[in-house]
Amino acid sequence: MKLTRRAKEVLGKLESFESEDLKTALDKLAISREELEEHLHPPEDKPYQRKALYKDENTELLVMNWADIECAPHDHGDSIGWIQVVNGTTKQTVYKVKGNRLPKVLFHEYKEKGDVFFSPRKGVHKMGRKGGDPLITVHLYSPPIQGMKVYDLDACAACIVSEECGAWWPEDQSEKISEIKLRAFKKAKKKKQSSVKK
Ligand SMILES: [Fe+2]
């Protein structure tokens, strides 16, 4: 059965959307690289090119074809999800976030072909290709992502992006729903120390 039809069969009939239900559904889909081939398009100047394989009000299934460019740190709005590495290796960086403060790196990890990893609600991460093998990943989110927050750590800023924008700082103003100025950890600490001395 074709992948898009299988996705409709499996995801369209899901009645529960807890993390374990989504993982079971993704396993059941048993997606191969070969059947993704027709859905891949060159990422061009962006970190990845994505294509929706299935979407309804509860879930969305996407394939991402990566360039050798890391995406920006981002969350997935209120969605949870599972990410499957179908080809290549990805380096994932996971951040700690608190309110409107600048995210801090918690750890890096590498996920290889065949690995499936969880993306928690409001978790902030970034991904990129590691090595020369093409990186292809499949992402199952519930509910479909809305209000994704993308970070520009150098500019100490974050913005909520529209559905048209991926995990990169939007070039087009129409893709930017709102912008947030972040507070840097270090600056806040220095200010506190100087006020103590006084
Ligand atoms: Fe992500």
Image: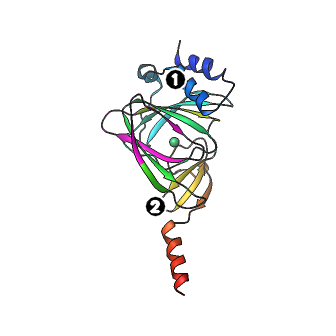
Question: Horizontal and vertical percent for residue 56?
Answer: 66, 28
**The furthest residue to the bottom:** 198
Magenta region includes residue 122: yes
- Looking at the rendered structure, which numbered label has been put on residue 136? none
Closer to the chain start, of discs 2 and 1, is 1
Vertically, is 70 above or below 19? below
Q: Nearer the viewer, mark 2 or mark 1?
A: 1
Query: Quick one: quadrant of the C terminus?
Result: bottom right
**Amino acid at circle 2:** Asp
- Mark 2 lies on residue: 154
- Residue at 61%, 49% in the rendered image: 174
According to the picture, the residue beneath numbered tag 1 turns out to be: 27
48, 107: nearer the viewer: 107
The percent position of residue 57, horizontal first and vertical second, equals 69, 31
For numbered disc 2, what is the local secondary structure? Answer: loop
The reply, left or right, for residue 3 in relation to residue 21 is left
Colour setup of the view = rainbow
Residue furthest left as drawn: 132
Q: Mark 1 Cα within 10 Å, few/some/many (few <14, many 20+)? A: few
Residue at 54% in and 20% down: 28
Question: Could you tell me how far apart the alpha carbons at marks 2 and 1 are, in whole angstroms?
Answer: 38 Å
**Magenta segment, which residues?**
108-135
Residue projecting furthest to the top: 1
Nearest the viewer among 116 and 71 is: 116
Q: Is residue 106 above or below residue 42?
A: below
- Residue 195 shown left or right of residue 34 in the figure: right
Density class for disc 2 (Cα within 10 Å; few <14, some 14-19, many ≥20) is: few
At label 1, the amino acid type is Asp
Could you say whether the residue bearing mark 1 is in a helix, strand or loop? helix
Instruction: Locate residue 114 relative to residue 120 in the image: left or right.
Output: left
